[in-house]
Amino acid sequence: MSGHSHAEGVLPHEPEKATLEGRNKVLGFWLFLGGETILFGTLFSVFIALRDQVNGGPTANELFSLTVVAIATLILLTSSLTSVFAIQAMHRNQPKAMVNWLIVTVLLGLGFLGLEIYEFVEYSHHGHTFAASAFSTSFYSLVGFHGGHVAFGILWISLLIWQVLKRGLTVVTAPKVYIAGLYWHFIDVVWVFIFTVVYLMGKVG
Amino acid sequence: MAHGSRAVKRYTGIMDWLTTVDHKKIGILYLISGGFFFLIGGLEALLIRIQLWKPLNDFVSPDTFNELITMHGTTMIFLGVMPVIFGLMNAVVPLQIGARDVAFPFLNALGFWTFFFGGLLLNISWLTGHVPDAGWTSYVPLASTTFSKGPGVDYYVLGLQISGIGSLLGGINFLVTIINMRAPGMSFMRMPMFTWASFVTSMLILLAFPALTVGLVALMFDRIFEGNFFDPSAGGNIMLWEHIFWIFGHPEVYILILPAFGIISEVVTTFSRKRLFGYSSMVFATVLIGFLGFMVWAHHMFTSGLGPVANALFSIATMLIAVPTGIKVFNWLFTMWGGSIKFTTPMLFAVGFIPTFVMGGVTGVMLAAAPADYQYHDSYFVVGHFHYTIVGGLVSGLFAGVHYWWPKMFGRSLNETLGKLTFWFFIIGFHMTFFLQHFLGLIGMQRRIFTYPDGMGFNEMNLISTIGALLMGLGVIFFVINVIVTTAKPRTATNDPWEDGRTLEWAIASPAPEYNFAQLPLIRGYDCYWKEKMEGNKELQPAEPLGPIHMPSPSILPFIMSVGLFISGFGFIYHQYVVAGVGLAITLACMFLRSVIEDHGYHIEPEEIQAKGV
Amino acid sequence: MATVNTEEAGLISVLKKRWLHWLRLTSLLAGAALLLSGCGRADLSPLNPQGSVAKEQLNIMKISISIMILVVAVVFVIAIFVLFRYRRRPGNDGIPVQVEGNHKLEIVWTVIPLILLVILGVPTVQTVFAQAQDYSKDENAVIVKVTAHQYWWEFEYPEEGIVTAQEMVVPKNSRIVIEAKTADVLHSFWVPALAGKIDTNPAGNVNRMYFDTPDKTGIFLGKCAELCGPSHALMDFKVKVVDAQSYANWLSAMKAPAVMPEDPAIAETFEKKCLSCHAVGELGTQVYPNLTGIGDRESVAGILINTDNPKYKNEGSVYDNLYRWLKDPQKVKPGNLMPTVELTEEELQGIARYLADYKLNYESEELRNNDATSDKEER
């Protein structure tokens, strides 16, 4: 049950699960994601209930540009893929490759955020501000919450990159990277739903 | 803070308590704070009852009355009984499953301190004069800035939000602990009922609290940042609040009662000297109640215009919960059947629980019938029902659990005579206070009214109800005296002070040593300690050799993080965003430090263990 | 000690011995329940329903409480028996037989509750649908649009084109369809003796309910049943069930031209200081409570009861109540939206006198006779 289990400096195959602490962290994080699912689910329900309440302002159809959103989606999905590559590298005991893939992930995440900020600024020029209507409040709450999660994830992964560079890939740092990867996949899945429910259905409905 | 393998940091005195990550100490912290807030909530209740003892009374103003009912409900549920539940879960579950601590000791401490500072934030509202007054359910539009102009409701929003973080963390912690850290041989179906109850409760917490989080965020955005979730003039919808609140609120009451069910199972079996009748059904019933608890929320909204299909469906779903609950009640009765019953204080409370909770449960089924509920809703009938289940039920269960596990936590047993006085005053006072409230509702008295006209037929029953409340207060005072008197005594409790302990926690010293088990035990069956006793063994076989025991390091970060949240709460309440930002920055900085500073804990060497003679 | 099978047999024999005790207990409790069904004021209590909807709802209550009394009795009897029979006695210190369970019993106490739930569930669902019917298109129904305010009740009769406040006058033997909403926060419209309640939501979520008036005249108490602010407790109203003739009289009186105060100075004050918020007849604004015929009503502001024999702190003559209200509305109903209007003592008395005398006198001969013979003690 101790935090060190290097046998002659060789990292075990799934280093994130090699210790009890690691296994606890992974399970705990899956459960946390279950709670986050309920949280986003509630935000989605609220958005769906209020999506038509534009209070005289612009509607979803008028506002959204699917091009920008499609590019953002592509960027985020790619970043999820690169985070998979990072974990694969971790499992192959290739810390340098892992770190490189994580850096790409962070950069793509920053790109996504940049696009989203640009998008929000554009909307505000069209009268779609937080306080404009029930639709706008629920839009910014849902999409903004997601964006906040992306921002937090970027900070977190950057911090972990630094830790791995300083201390190496160990049975202590591996679980941290693994759950950050889970987190990143989660916010990617949430984005798929946002893209569908908010943007696609907004343009069609 | 300890760095890597450097000198072990061990604190004493108050720093010990501020930095502890030990589940046993955290359990005590929860118990003390919960008890403190329970007393505040109780005082609020007495003031409410004094105002209502006669018609057209002016003991408190209508505004103050609305503040009292709001704070009474919110404090009792979130800051009174839930922490006591967490306190018992912390004190007992790791010991029952043979673990040395919970899965995330640091998060455990963080959960406590966020609960504490959230509760402090909410109750400081009394000192600032801006007290929330829209009810513990805080319905909009009343709770919006249009109709609740001052910061009162903001205290509710921010206080509960911060406190809720603690609950969520606690839930995740116990789930992982129970899934991953059971001692060898402790399969799921060999776990004690209190652990099972804690497990299902933790799952409910995980799935219910996020809904409350969203609701509170939405209300906060509406009130502080001019959002429009609930503002009809901008397209918002007040029904959303009701749905979101009750999707959380109904599972919440099962979060409250399931641990009490677990306690009753432990106490009834111990003091009947008999194993639990129908253990598998009890487990199944607990899980089913937890599951069904998510399907019934709209029975709080029967009169809000959901339509006949919804009302009919939710009526039936609500009635169904009576079935697994009934299974539990009969299983307890038949555990006692053929047993050898000893009426200790915990057993008295457990035995008081059963008929009282059944009465609360049947009024629940009555409420479930929607057309009847059109009359009962928002009347004193409902007030009677939920006090029967929460006070007559849950609080009796908590008194049973607290008296039962007190020696395990503190090394001293509470005084039996004072305990019996507590019981009799409390239970008699309780029935006096709340039984007649059903009839008050049935003859037309609404709830949440600061006074009532004369000549309605309400006078006598309200007077009796108030007298009952005073008796309950006396019962609680006896308990407080008991705690004080007991604390002054020396620590002489044995490992099994009730002599009939069945579960693992009674196999180790009272109080448990810092590391709980010198060697993790081998579990050979359900009621594992009883099994060993019946086979003539004084203790369980170890499942591992004696070795150095790894312990997590104490840390001041959870305390500071919670202070940061507390500060930011104040900032948001008073629209001082710099302050809010500073508070959040403190919290984030602590999270940064926690991630970056690698602390591998410390070890207790075998020589130290043997020196302590355990 | 006994084995499981003998225990089962012992259980059955004990139950047989106890059924008498059981029966006695159940009938005692059922008797108590029935006794209570006559309980409470006839103008207020759901246990003493006067309208058909409230009667149907009491019926569901009776079914549920009978079933539940049975359940409680069974639990109590077993519990009391167990606690006495199996308490630990000195010298009897052994370890009892450890019983894992009993399949048959477990099935029994799963299946029987399910059956009981079906017995309750079927009439519940039937009544839910029956009471959700929309009778607004019914020719004979009287439609009243209820708007709840902090802290008063507005009643609009769209088919008649009239608006009144605090007192809903309706004909006996009729179906009244209520369309309820709020002008501000959530309230709840509740006339316990006639029907269960309906919440008043903001305009986007108007709720509809109906109730049937009884075959005889009477005045029924209404309560607000959703926390709405400091004066939530004081937001009472009345439903006055009258005969057809009185109802027709009331309708035409409400449509009659406004009666202004005789004294021109008072009339001027009334117009300047009151009609900017209130209405009488066709004059003034309908934003706040309509004052037409206020002298006839059972109460002022819903909570100050009009009577010539005041008994309680909230009772007084119509004039006294009006004077008390006008003098300091915030004192009577904290938080309500009427400020203290600046009036000289003369103006105050004049307006109170005028409003106290503003009666519609719509009560028919029949109704006046009923009032004379009925019990006037209950308010």
Image (cartoon, rainbow, N blue to C red):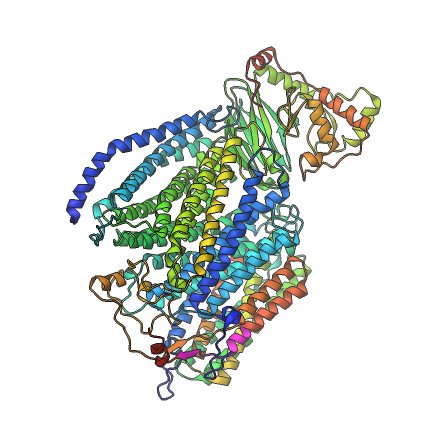
* Residue B593 on the magenta span: yes
The residue furthest right is C265
Residue B50 is situated, as x and y percent measured from the top left of the image, at 56, 40
Q: In the image, is residue A63 above or below residue A23?
A: above
Q: Which residue appears at 19% of the width and 39% of the height?
A: C12
* Residue A36 visible in the current orientation: no
Q: Quadrant of residue A137?
A: bottom right
Across the whole image, how many numbered discs are drawn on residues?
0
Q: Quadrant of residue B426?
A: top left
Q: Which residue appears at 35% of the width and 78% of the height?
A: B611
Residue A77 is situated, as x and y percent measured from the top left of the image, at 49, 70
| Closer to the camera in the image, A112 or B333 | B333
Residue A204 is situated, as x and y percent measured from the top left of the image, at 54, 55
Q: Is residue B32 left or right of residue B323?
A: right
Q: Which residues are magenta?
A: B591-603
| Closer to the camera in the image, B7 or B218 | B7
Q: In the image, is residue A57 above or below residue B464?
A: below
Quadrant location of the C terminus of chain B in the rendered image: bottom left
Q: Which residue appears at 22% of the width and 53% of the height?
A: C93
The residue furthest bottom is A8
* Residue B412 on the magenta span: no
Q: Is residue B567 left or right of residue A100?
A: right
Q: Is residue B290 left or right of residue C306?
A: left
| Closer to the camera in the image, C71 or A152 | C71
Q: Quadrant of residue C355?
A: top right
Q: Which residue appears at 57% of the width and 57% of the height?
A: B159
Residue C129 is situated, as x and y percent measured from the top left of the image, at 43, 34
* Residue B516 visible in the current orientation: yes
